[in-house]
Structure formats: structure tokens, C-alpha cells
Image (tube, rainbow, N blue to C red):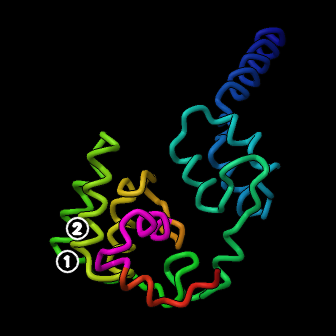
Amino acid sequence: MKRIYAAFAVVAVSLSSCSATPADPLSDLRSAINAGKECPELFPLLKAIPNSDDAQGEMRNIGCYTVSSKRTDAERAAIDPNSDWIGVPGGKRVEVSKECLDASKRAANEVDSEAAETLIRRTLEACQGTNEWLSAVAKYPGVMGMVEGYIPSVTDIEVACGVHPDTAVCTDFGRLEIAG
């Protein structure tokens, strides 16, 4: 009888170790980011997450584009700590017009990069200012090739306006005093 109980105890312990929650590599990456780890320390964690758009977005959010990149999130956030958009002074979420939202949704859903470029320009024309455009990008991050949960930053609008400077949004953005 003791052997049966002993065998049962061994099986129970074995089963309990099987039910342990496996490590979540994305949570590990996010924890390391929140702990202030630098890009070279984060890339091994990123490599442990194959083909993850979420992980790539997390790295882009903090300026880690390559293993030798320097984090820029703290520097950008210091521009205006109360801004909803990293590195954008006076950045606030606003209600987005239907026209701006529709244009952003179309751009976010486009898979052809050439067609998407035209649709991105359309978002910059349909939205009336920096905060409206960034609010739309927050709702539809695919506009800039990002994933859900992405927090738009000054980099997004700089990239878009570098290609389409003569749009309503980029004209508004040009009036902001951005530390260069």
C-alpha cells in the first residue's frame, strides 16, 4: 500500500511540473524594456521570439532598430512628459474626424507598399493636424507598419512628413518646436 501512495506521489509531482506555465518570451522582453535594459541586452530576448510583430514594435517604440542602437524613448519622452505622443510637444489624443479615420483604416489595411504610400499621403491630407493624425495612427498603427498597442512617436510623423511635406498635417507639424 505504501508503494502505491509513493508511486501516486511521484506521478502527482511529475504532473504538477508539466502544468507549470511556460515562459512568455514577449513578457520577458517587455519586463527587460521596463527595467531599462539597453538595446544590446534586449536583442537576444528579441531573437527568442521568432516572427513577432509585437516584439518588433516594442523594440521600435524605444528606438532599438539594431543591436548597436541607443534607446531614445527616455530622451524623447523628456521633450514633453505630459505628451500622449513620444517626442511631440503638446501631444494630446483628440477625437478624429470620420474622413481621417476612414483614410487611416484604408492605409492600415493595405498590404501593397506602393499602394500604401499613396494612402499614407491621403491620411496626411484627410487629418487636419498633428494630434489628429497621431490619434488616428494610435487607432490604426498599421498606417505606419506597426502593431496594436503601439504608441505613436515623433519618428512616425517625421518619416511620413519627410516623404509628404506639403500636406495639412505636415504643415501643422512644421510649426511645432521639436528639439533637433
Q: Amino acid at mark 1?
A: Ser
Percent position (x, y) of residue 153?
52, 70
On the image, the x and y values in percent for residue 75 come to 71, 76
Answer left or right for 136 relative to 63: left
Say above or below: 81 vs 113.
below
Reading the image, the residue beneath label 1 is 97
Task: Tell me the residue at 27%/62% (across/down).
Answer: 104
**Quarter of the figure with the C terminus:** bottom right
Side of 145 where 101 appears, left or right: left
At 54% across and 67% down in the image, what residue appears? 155
Q: Looking at this view, is 114 or 7 the one in front? A: 114
Residue drawn at x 44%, y 84% is: 174
Q: CA distance from mark 2 to mark 1?
A: 6 Å
Query: Which residue is pictured at 45% across the width and 70% down the height?
Result: 157
> Does residue 86 lie above or below 29 as drawn?
below
Tell me if residue 71 comes above or below residue 64 in the rendering. below
Name the foreground residue: 160 vs 69. Answer: 160
Q: Considering the numbered disc 2 on the image, is that residue within a helix, a strand or a loop? A: helix
Task: Tell me where residue 140 appears, x and y as whole percent.
Answer: 33, 60
**Which range of residues does the magenta coloring cover?**
156-170
**Is residue 169 highlighted in magenta?**
yes
Q: Are marks 2 and 1 in contact (CB under 8 Å)?
A: yes
Give the overall secondary structure of the magenta segment.
helix
Q: Horizontal and vertical percent for residue 120?
A: 31, 59
Residue 28 forms part of the magenta stretch: no
- The crowd level at tag 1 (other Cα within 10 Å; few <14, some 14-19, many 20+) is some
Q: Which residue is mark 2?
A: 101
Give the residue at the far front of this rendering.
166
Query: In this rendering, would 77 be left or right of 7?
Result: left
